[in-house]
Amino acid sequence: MSFSIVELVGYLASLLIVASLAMKSVVRLRVVSLLGSIVFVVYGVLLGSIPLIITNVAAAGLNIWYLRQEFRPDRDIGAVPIEAEAPFLQDFLSSHREDINRFHPGFSGPDDGDFVRLLTRDGLPAGAVIGRPDGTTLHLSLDYVMSAFRDSRIGAWLYGAGSTTFTAAGFTTVTAQPESEALRSYLLRQGFEETADGLTLTVS
């Protein structure tokens, strides 16, 4: 069985659209869907189908608009103080336990006296950061963002413009002992440096 170039372009476009529906990350979904729409436009041109071209130009435009919204500088990201024993936090951590264990296999939950912040995006819960205070140093025990928002630069905000989350609580240094390579790579990308005590970041 042989396929023409036009058919192959159509199959590729369809594959990209179907693949986008399997993405857990909002950003990846939009990017793959955008690529699918662009290939469908090419497919429409090859077929000479105006309705197909118009539909997918519109779909591509919507994907671009949503991606720009996702990465706009004033995106509403926050870190809200919450008690370690708060039922909402306990439910949140429990419902994401399996995903959390991929990055923090030794995490068992927050302790009394821990620094706890619920990470939010557009007012909705997106993750949590938990650590043990030690003077002006915070020892991270959890830095978790839901898979849907993992490409939304929440970490870049937390350790960049949002570092007041830590400084307002009196911390000047954040340290971590990553339990997984994925977590280590993530923290290094956020500016942490290798030290004798693990990974360290000075916040200001």
Image: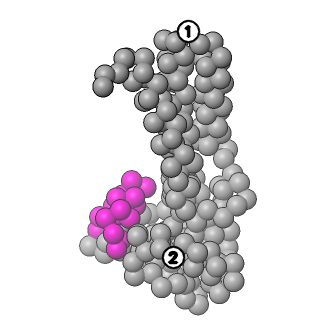
> What's the coloring here?
one colour
Furthest residue to the right? 123
Mark 2 is surrounded, within 10 Å at the Cα level, by few (under 14), some (14 to 19) or many (20 or more) other residues, namely: some
Confirm whether the magenta stretch covers residue 190: yes
Label 2, secondary structure: give it.
helix
Q: CA distance from mark 1 to mark 2?
A: 51 Å
x, y (%) of residue 175? 41, 71
The quadrant where residue 4 appears: top left
Q: Which label is found at residue 169?
A: none
The quadrant where residue 58 appears: top right
Residue drawn at point x = 65 percent, y = 23 percent: 55
x, y (%) of residue 21? 54, 46
Which residue type does callout 1 highlight? Gly
Residue drawn at point x = 73 percent, y = 59 percent: 123
Residue 134 in view of the camera: no
Which residue type does callout 2 highlight? Arg
Furthest residue to the top? 48
x, y (%) of residue 61? 63, 26
The quadrant where residue 81 appears: bottom right
How many marks overall?
2
Q: Is residue 105 left or right of residue 156?
A: left
Q: Is residue 174 left or right of residue 1?
A: right
Q: Return the residue at label 2.
A: 97
Residue 24 in view of the camera: yes
Confirm whether the magenta stretch covers residue 28: no
Mark 1 is surrounded, within 10 Å at the Cα level, by few (under 14), some (14 to 19) or many (20 or more) other residues, namely: few
x, y (%) of residue 76? 69, 51
Q: Return the residue at label 1.
A: 48
Relative vertical location of residue 131 with respect to residue 123 in this rendering, above or below: below
Q: Nearer the viewer, residue 198 or 23?
A: 23
Which region of the structure is painted magenta?
178-195
